[in-house]
Image (cartoon, rainbow, N blue to C red):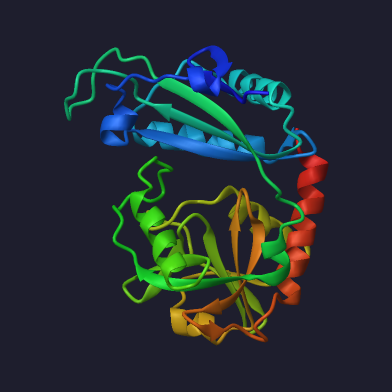
């Protein structure tokens, strides 16, 4: 069965999905996106993704005609039409198509695209073994808090990690870790769970927010601050969080084993809590 894609009001087979060559997402990366995980055919933390989507659109002055209820209905239809039990729904909104000009066009109709990807999320082999990361300089633009489609440098970071025989990369700016290429970075040290504070340097991860909440409810001590690669290498544990990896242990950084060099108890427990709570609250 052909995968069904949503493009501007129509559900079409993926080979028939078309967007204008003048779309500003293509020409300027003038657009934003969200990725919502699906477990058991239901959407995980949908409200959180819609809240962040609204913020990103607002920061770029993109006005859209769709309500959260409209987008929820489209997401659910995409899950149904693609018989998606576990995986993700990708949503992208751009400013729309207009003749190429750096100035925002007046009256352009936003472009809305969604597609699904079936993926093994809950029982990920990587969660059992942990992943290895390298560090790379963070040379992205200064508004990383907006979830734009400008993802070339994170892609380059992942390729650098692959070339080094690792799984992913953590980006470093002014001596401190900002975030992973597609995730938030965490360590466990001195009895505390540590992740970088929010600001324009990082994306406010939806999974990050959930894990902070779950950790507090479990009476784990959490600290939001910057940390260095050296501190991370010396930590008891490290892990990353994202909508599609949930809580994923990191077992080595730049070739140095973290803790015992295997997934630790804090990351394992947080992943367990996250999966339980996400399945319970999914819509």
- Give coordinates of residue 6: x percent, y percent: 55, 20
For residue 258, above or below residue 71: below
In this view of the protein, can residue 220 be seen by the observer?
Answer: no
Q: Is residue 136 left or right of residue 190?
A: left
Q: Is residue 271 left or right of residue 71?
A: right
Which residue is at 60% across, 18% downward?
A: 70
Which residue is at 65% across, 70% downward?
A: 130
Which residue is at 47% across, 31% downward?
A: 92
- Give coordinates of residue 178: x percent, y percent: 42, 65
Q: Nearer the viewer, residue 87 or 141?
A: 87
Q: Which of the 4 image quarters holds residue 201?
A: bottom left
Which residue is at 40% across, 32% downward?
A: 58
Q: Nearer the viewer, residue 266 or 214?
A: 266
- Give coordinates of residue 217: x percent, y percent: 76, 60
Q: Which of the 4 image quarters holds residue 24?
A: top left
In this view of the protein, can residue 107 be seen by the observer?
Answer: yes
For residue 232, above or below residue 33: below
């Amino acid at each position: 069965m052909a995968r069904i894609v949503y493009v501007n009001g129509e559900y079409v087979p993926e080979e028939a999905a078309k967007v204008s060559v003048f779309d500003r997402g293509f020409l300027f990366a003038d657009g934003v996106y969200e990725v919502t995980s699906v477990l058991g055919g239901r959407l995980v933390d949908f409200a959180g993704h819609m809240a962040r989507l609204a913020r990103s659109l607002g920061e770029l002055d993109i006005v859209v005609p769709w309500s959260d209820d409209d987008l929820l209905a489209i997401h659910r239809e995409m899950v149904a039409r693609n018989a998606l039990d576990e995986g993700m729904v990708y949503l992208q909104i751009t400013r729309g198509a207009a003749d190429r000009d750096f100035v925002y066009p007046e009256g352009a109709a936003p472009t809305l695209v969604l597609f699904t990807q079936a993926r093994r999320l809950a029982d990920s082999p990587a969660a059992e073994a942990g992943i290895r990361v390298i560090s790379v300089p963070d040379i992205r633009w200064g508004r990383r808090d907006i979830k734009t489609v400008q993802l070339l440098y994170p892609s380059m970071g992942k390729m650098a990690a692959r070339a080094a025989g690792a799984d992913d990369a953590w980006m470093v700016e002014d001596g401190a870790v900002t975030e992973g290429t597609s995730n938030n970075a965490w360590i466990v040290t001195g009895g505390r769970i540590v992740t970088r504070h929010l600001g324009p340097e990082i994306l406010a991860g939806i999974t990050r927010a959930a894990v902070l909440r779950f950790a507090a409810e479990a009476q784990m001590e959490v600290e939001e601050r910057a940390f260095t690669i050296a501190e991370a290498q010396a930590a008891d544990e490290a892990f990353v969080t994202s909508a599609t990896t949930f809580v994923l242990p990191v077992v080595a950084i730049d070739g140095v084993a973290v803790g015992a060099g295997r997934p630790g108890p804090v990351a394992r427990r947080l992943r367990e809590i996250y999966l339980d709570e996400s399945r319970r609250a999914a819509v």
